[in-house]
Amino acid sequence: MKMKHVKVVLTTALSAAMVIGNASALYAGVNTASTNLNFRESAGGTVIGAIPSGARVAVIDNTSEWYRVAYNGAIGYVSADYIQYSEDGDVDLGTGIVNEDSVNIRTEPNTDSEVMLQLNTDDCVDVNGVVDGWYRVAIDDTAGYIYADYLTFEHTMTDTPAQHHEAAATQEQSSAEADKLLSYAEKFLGTPYVYGGSTPSGFDCSGFTTYVFRNALGISLPRTSSEQSQTYTRINSISELKPGDLVFFGNGSKVNHVGIYVGEGEFIHSPHTGSYVKYDTLNSGNYYKNFMWGGRVL
């Protein structure tokens, strides 16, 4: 399934999603003792993850002795004995996935407020608050709201970049992730370059890399090429690059461009105004001349 992602502030990791039910009951809660987030409404069976004492959650359904809650990018069940009502506000919930087309992100948590952006099925946002039955999300540097019925969550807790790297430590896992990443990136060949763009309507160079990594693998990259170049393990030689590595270019010591290495001396990128997402070579020409280093994410 092709997943589309909007740039957000929080980190995310995506897997199979499940639609939230009874979201109109949404409110913030606090976990009063360390407990498990369970896949089903019982103490036995699959455990999705742990919720520490004092953690804030979103209560989605409280109609039984097992509350359905969202926490850290996952949805599951917690005994009602452990959940206490809390004031709406900041609740770090991780990634939410839009479950319908033409879903509005609004400036305030009501239908009378201005529409900032319209999303479609499988667009992904990260959720950082609960207010009056709406999820608060962050898009670039702007906060907005989506009505809770229109977001789903997965059954796997959000991980950090370091945890993701550890989980993909073996060569086989890294290779599989690289294949998935590059197959997804290929879907956007021909997409026009747009300065500041980070959606399939148009990408700049780092908007493209950010979108592809986040949406294909759930890895959140820093937004600019300069920030990306300082974040990951540096690969100084073109000959040492592996598929899925970031490749950085610039003049002198300043990085001003980034792409994704494909293999055999080629990389995919969104080059500049008037161009479009395409493959180019590292083996000769300006990109060979201006190559600075690679960055190993996987």
Image (cartoon, helix red, strand yellow):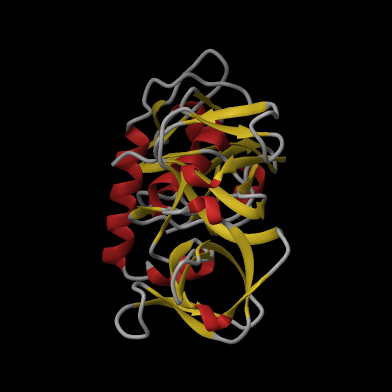
- Position in image of residue 289 (x %, y %): 53, 33
Task: Locate residue 192, reporting x and y percent.
Answer: 48, 18
Q: Is residue 141 left or right of residue 264?
A: right
Give whichever of 73, 199 is nearer the camera.
Answer: 73
Residue at 65 percent across and 61 percent down: it is 91
Q: Quadrant of residue 93?
A: bottom right
* Residue nearer the viewer, 234 or 23: 23
Q: Residue 119: image x %, image y %?
A: 50, 31
Tally the numbered discs: 0
33 horizontally vs 280: left or right: right
Q: Point out the image quarter for the C terminus.
A: bottom left
**Vertical placement of residue 47 versus 268, above or below:** below
> Eyeballing the image, is 211 above or below 28?
above
| Residue at 60% over, 87% down | 33
Q: Nearer the viewer, residue 40 or 7?
A: 40
Report the residue at 49% width, 16% height from top.
Answer: 275
